[in-house]
Amino acid sequence: MEQLKSLWFFSLFLLFLSPFAESGSIGVNYGRIANDLPSAVQVVKLLKSNGLQRVKVYDTDPAVLRALSGSGIKVTVDLPNELLFAASQRLSFAYNWVQKNVAAYYPSTEIEAIAVGNEVFVDPHNTTSYLVPAMKNIHQALVKYNLDSKIMVSSPIALSALQNSYPASAGSFRPELVETVFRPMLDFLRRTGSYLMVNAYPFFAYESNTDVISLDYALFRDNPGVVDTGSGYRYFSLFDAQIDAVFAAMSALKYDDINMVVSETGWPSKGDENEIGASVENAAAYNGNLVHRILSGGGTPLRPKADLTVYLFALFNENKKNGPTSERNYGLFYPNEEKVYDIPFTAEGLKEYKDKPSRKPISAPTGAPVSGGDGGVSKSQTGNTWCVASGEAGREKLQAGLDYACGEGGADCRPIQVGATCYNPNTLEAHASYAFNSYYQKNNRKVGTCYFGGAAYVVTQPPKYGSCEFPTGY
């Protein structure tokens, strides 16, 4: 059986080298958290000159939508998380929002989808319960303006929405989200003919698990592959394994008929010292090989006919983004419109494309799980999340949150006492992060348990404060 499956995937791998007949589609995320970006008119020229025919934006800025008018570029717009409550509670709000931000520009601006919220399940403002009602009301507004057959409604989810993703065939959604969100959302997507949006970043999995994941496997380069012990399929890229984990989670709920769009994926060209793998060479390899993979056609082992639409993150380096250095260095272009690295975005351009791997020996990814945590499953591939303190919240909020977590909150704060394993670094942010995470994990990572008055937020990578290890469950 495994030989047949390996042979099948080898055939698919050969397709990777074949002409671009039936294939997926490449788009780009146009974020604007920066103060040095070119005008929207210049950006549209940049997109067209590089053959990028799809763009996703994180709002409905009039200047951007006007600039895209008549360009022939297909657009996905976003209703921000902060508007979910209003959109879920009042149909009149949804009517007005669609009329002002969508109908007013369509069809000259070719809006093809509305992303309702973004990674809502990790939003610290507890907006999850508003998501599906907001999606339904936005769709109803499209019906009102006779746009429901032309514009799809969905919502991007992060991989942290998965309880398990290793091996891919064991993919499953977090139990607390299944009946409350995923079943009604997937029902809605099926009824409206829409698709699930997924944000997938192999970089996070790689940089947290370099001991068990080879760089070649993460960058679509030649490698021996990893056999899924559940399905028998052999995977040659971490990206395909992550996507199939979501397909498996949908299949487990009997939603095999719903398609997927990868609404974000990318690799940083620069990072902090502990962000292993963040470099120009690796970013060029990941995105260049990904474009080749998608435009070559063919789906994944679990969904061989799933030609994917994939949106690269992001168009520009954004100098005002918070977080580690990598957050400001996902761009394909510098703000002056020069390429950070040279990769093509079209089938025509790929005819001359060749990845330039470093001369390092190929190391086989073992696929072995990292010990500890959730039953020995790899930390970064299980959909685990942690709660950390926001350094921008201020000392007063952090101290109040720390006092509550270690007091009536019942967090295990013994490791941050003097002389204990997590006392160093002895900073308020580090101690608060440990306490917040302990409270969050003890409450089974329930929505709303990582808030602390806005002093905390959820992350999908293991927090790093000295040598302290943060628990993933109790």
Image: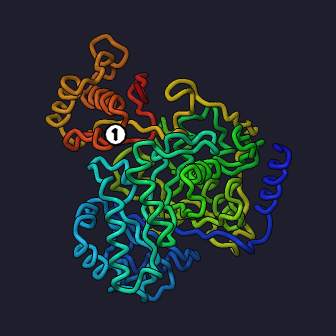
Whether residue 281 is visible here, answered yes or no, is no
Left-right relation of 276 to 307? left
Q: Nearer the viewer, residue 304 or 50?
A: 304
Q: Nearer the viewer, residue 40 or 386?
A: 386
The furthest residue to the top: 419
Residue 29 pos. (x, y %): 46, 65
Q: Is residue 10 positioned above or below 150 on the image?
A: above
Q: Say which residue appears at 25% left-offset and 73% top-offset.
A: 91
Q: How many marks overall? A: 1
Q: Nearer the viewer, residue 93 or 404?
A: 93
Q: Say which residue appears at 54% left-offset and 69% top-offset.
A: 27
Q: Quadrant of the N terminus?
A: top right
Q: Is residue 474 positioned above or below 136 on the image?
A: above
Q: Quadrant of the C terminus?
A: top left
Q: Say which residue appears at 28% left-offset and 62% top-offset.
A: 84
Residue 380 pos. (x, y %): 52, 38
Q: Residues within 10 Å of mark 1 (few under 14, many from 20)?
A: some
Q: What secondary structure is marked by label 1?
A: loop
Whether residue 213 is visible here, answered yes or no, is yes
Q: Is residue 178 positioned above or below 143 on the image?
A: above
Q: Quadrant of residue 155?
A: bottom left
Q: Which residue is mark 1?
A: 446
Structure colour scheme: rainbow
Residue 45 pos. (x, y %): 48, 80
Left-right relation of 343 to 137? right
Residue 241 pos. (x, y %): 64, 48
Q: Disc 1 residue type?
A: Lys
Left-right relation of 35 to 161? left
Q: Is residue 412 positioned above or below 366 on the image?
A: above
Q: Say which residue appears at 69% left-offset and 61% top-offset.
A: 299
